[in-house]
Each structure stands twice: as structure tokens, then as C-alpha cells.
Image: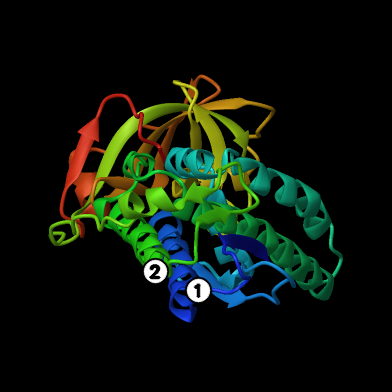
Amino acid sequence: MGQIQIRFEVPNHYMSVNAFVVSAKSAQRALHALNRELFDDQLDLELVVFAPEPGSVRQLLKVVVKGAKATAWGVAGSYGILWTVVQGLETDIAKEVVKELTGKLPAQIAADVVSDFKERIERANTEQQREALEKVATEQACKEIAEVMSQASSSVLAIPRERLERLPLSHTTIFELSDAQAEMFEGCIADRRISSVEIENNDHPPIPRHEFPRRAIRPKRPEPETDESEEWRVSLETIVVTSPNLEEEDQQTRQWKGKTSNDRKALFTVEDREFWDRLHRKELSFAENTEIVVQVATRFLNGRAKQSKVLRVLKFEGDEIAQPIDENGLKAILGELKSVTTEDGFGHLLN
């Protein structure tokens, strides 16, 4: 469980119930807004009240990540879904948001937990042993994600409005975060006993009362969003594979990892039937930093990359093994979506 600590500076160690409740609701709004934006609302989150310490008025809230919700991607089991969520922390947008809010990069979470449990899970002799290890790994991942989410959500309540508005998030999420902060300071203004508010366990200084009115200004509600625009963008890319997943049926649990020619991280699945047949026949084998040239399709929702899959592996370590799928073939594969575009240079691979 990650902890959110809000300290209210008051003369007589008490404050109004309204200001206390409103601040907790504001923290909850920030928490759920970040879950929707960064993880497509896949985390099963709960904000609970923690036993308070004696003495000054201090609000202790705990973020509890109970697991992950089932999604339309068809990932089986909480373990598989949760690791899809954890991999989402490695995207550039999640990194930038979490770094801005917490001062830390989140990718190490996945690296630490995966490296600790991956080999033990693969070496498990029985299904019962594997399930037991997956349960422990999931619990550990939940704790680590809860810590990130608690730090990010508490920071939302503390940082100046102009920094919130610069975050690379959707207009709707920026509004939710800014309005949550404004709501909390409205409640603090109403209680004249509160001389300052401090969001503890981070580097943000206490916020004095004279700053409350500026923080309490409600943001302008964004215009209603138009219908969701979904499209596939297809292009060719050279990828150095740093972590292949040679278990075809396990790709939704653990995606392939690599680096593009412009040194950006890539997370993807491989859906080239002929390529998998070659692997099964042991005609191809991966070594450290194997280079492949691929034809990749990335699903964009409202302009943001959501999913990438390799449709055809064209070259393997410099040897040509296939030809690109033509436009008619691409439309046959991806035609159920609104549009298919082809680009030279693939700079958006799970960007």
C-alpha cells in the first residue's frame, strides 16, 4: 500500500469535517484520473483511511492496488493483466508524467520485480508452484504500483497549477487533476483555522494560506470530446531485440522488448505465422541483440499509441526472409478499423 499524508497546520489540533473529507475526495479524484490516463483504468484501486497518528491533525490515506481488471485485450488471469499494466509504465508518456510528479522513473519497478520472479516462475516444476510464485509476484507488483500511484496522486495536490497544465496528459485528465486540487483548497479556505497545508513524504514545501485562493481557482471544463477516433498506422522498422518472448501463446502476458533505430524502447507482439513456423522448426535462433527488420502496425486511439504488433518479419540478422504485406493485405487484416496509413520511419512504436 502506498501512503498519502496531508498535514493541516491548525492551532488547536482540530479542523472542520468538511475540509477533511473534501481533501480525501480530491486525492481520490486525482488517483482515479491517473489510473484512467496512464493505465486505461485497468488497475483495481481503492483509497482507504489509515489509522491516524496522535497529536496534530494529519490525514493518512492508503492506496491499495488489489489487482488488475479484465480488459478487452483478452489477457488471461490477474497475473497476465497486471504485467501488461506494469509494462505500460515503460512508455515515454508514463515515464514523463511519473518523473514530473514524483522525481523518479517508474521503469525500474518492472525491471526489479520481473527479474526477481521471472526465472523462478519459468523453472517451476508444477502448475501449483507456478501459480504460487505468480501470486507472490503479483502481490509485490501491486505494492510497487501503489507506491508510484500514491506519490503521483499526492503530488497532484501540491504542485503549482501551471506545472499540472504542462503534463503530457489529455485535456480531460488535466481538468480532473486541476479541479481536484481546487476542490481541496476550497475546503481549506472555508476552515479559517488552517494556516497551511503540507503534502508529506515528497519534496514539496508547505503551502501557506495566502496561496489557497490561487490554488482554489476552478479550471475551465474542456469541450466535450468527439467520438473516439481509432486507426492503425503501418510502417517498416529496424529493431534490435533485447528480450524476445519465444512462447507464442504467452505474448499477451509478456510482450517482446527491443530498441528502434532511433534508440527508443519498443514493446510489441509478433503475429507473423510464417515467422513462428520457422522458429518452431528451429530455422531461426535469437542471440544477444539480434536485429530484425519488421512491418509493424500500431493502434492509435485519439492520436495516442495503444498497441503495436509485428505483422511481418522481413529480415533476420540481415538475411531477407519475407516480403512486406501489400496495401490490400493490410486492409484485409486491419480493415475493421477506420483507416490504415503507411509511414516511412517508425518513431511512434509504443511511444
205 relative position to 159: left or right? right
Residue 251 visible? The answer is no
Query: Total of numbered circles in the picture?
Result: 2
CA gap, disc 2 to disc 1?
8 Å
Cβ–Cβ under 8 Å for marks 2 and 1: yes
- Tell me the SS state at disc 1: helix
Instruction: Say the numbered circle drawn on residue 242.
Output: none
Q: How many residues crowd mark 2 within 10 Å: few (<14), some (14–19), many (20+)? A: many
Residue at position x 39%, y 28% from top? 237
Residue bearing mark 2: 187
Q: Quadrant of residue 57?
A: bottom right
Q: Which quadrant of the figure contains the C terminus?
A: top left
Between 145 and 323, the one nearer to me in the picture: 145
Residue at position x 23%, y 51% from top? 302
Q: Amino acid at mark 2?
A: Gly
Q: Quadrant of residue 36?
A: bottom left
Q: How many residues crowd mark 1 within 10 Å: few (<14), some (14–19), many (20+)? A: many
Residue 296 in the image, given as x and y percentages of width and height: 37, 39
Between 262 and 184, the one nearer to me in the picture: 184
Q: Amino acid at mark 1?
A: Phe
Q: Which quadrant of the figure contains the N terminus?
A: bottom right
User: Is residue 257 placed above or below 56 in the rendered structure?
Assistant: above
User: Is residue 153 placed above or below 104 in the rendered structure?
Assistant: below
Residue positioned most to the front = 11
Between 331 and 190, the one nearer to me in the picture: 190
Residue at position x 61%, y 77% from top? 49
81 relative position to 114: left or right? left
144 relative position to 25: left or right? right
- Tell me the SS state at disc 2: helix
Residue bearing mark 1: 20
